[in-house]
Image (spheres, grey):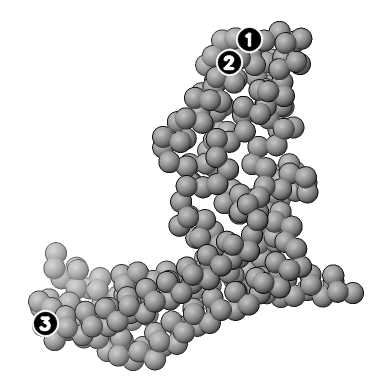
Amino acid sequence: MMGNYHRFIQTIPLERWVALFIIVIGLTIPSYAKKELESEHIIALREEIQILNLLTNLYLTPTQMHQLIPKIKQAEQERNRLQSYLKSNEAQTIAALNQLRAELIAGKDISPDTERKINSIQGQAKKELYTMKQRIDAIADEVRNILNPNQRVVLVEYVPCLIPAKDIRHPALVGQAENDERLEQMLLRIRKMPQPVYEKNRENIVDRFLEHKKLYLKPEELEQEKRQLLQVLDEAYRLNETDFTVKKSVLLARMKPIRKHPTSIEFERDRVKLFLLDPKLIPILESRLASIAK
């Protein structure tokens, strides 16, 4: 059994050990470093289109674009600083990993010297990573403050896509997670259901409607919103046509979210880092600013 393990260890290339070590210390391998089924060109195109869709929905002003560009550059400088540190310590890291791998292949206990080297490299790398995270988090908070409340809602609720849903592309709907037209259509559909069908599916309908909010609402908030929506649906289903027409606007208002903003600042910050601090945004923003200036 141990012989099979040793043969398995010997088949692992050194670069895989380096990648594994990076994962162990908490660093994320960027998408461009992964071996995907699709080509890197297709992956890059997909990512850029997803960013463009979000950007289209945010309707950034020229002032916001001017403010955002230097923030992206600052974040990229921090990432490059960490990469430079890792690169400068690459020889030392590879030597320590080679030493660890050799001891594992030989079936030996890890020596105190190897353990000391690995712990030292790991500890310093974690410290550098933490420093970078703190600095980029601060930049992300500055970007959050650049956005208006509606734009922050769009950012939080954005689902990366190639073709956005029609109701979110309309300028009048920016920042409205549930627009009146969509909600009204939902009510009209359920009112046409036979009662047994409605009773069987009412909770599933609400669960699907609230699916995206699981990302940021607390369980008790999600449950509260679910109860509120179920009450509205039940009332809308029971009303006759005349009463429904009269009360429709009130029902729609009650279907709006209990709270627009996510409860977790950390989640909102992560969305900023994922989408708005991507260096691919810089040429896009610069191009738009140039077009506006003409």
Residue 196 in sight: yes
Q: Residue at x 70, y 37 (%)?
A: 179
Q: Which of 98 and 69 is in front in this view?
A: 69
Q: Which of 171 and 191 is in front in this view?
A: 171
* Amino acid type, mark 3: Ser
Which quadrant of the rendered structure holds the N terminus? Answer: bottom left
- Farthest residue in the right direction? 294
Residue 38 horizontal/vertical position (percent): 58, 64
The answer to the question of whether label 2 and label 1 lie on touching residues, with beta carbons closer than 8 A, is yes
Residue to which mark 2 is pinned: 234
Residue 238 marker: 1
The residue indicated by pointer 3 is: 111
Vertical placement of residue 182 versus 96, above or below:
above
- The image quadrant of residue 253 is top right
Comparing labels 1 and 3, the label whose residue is closer to the camera? 1
- Element type at mark 3: loop
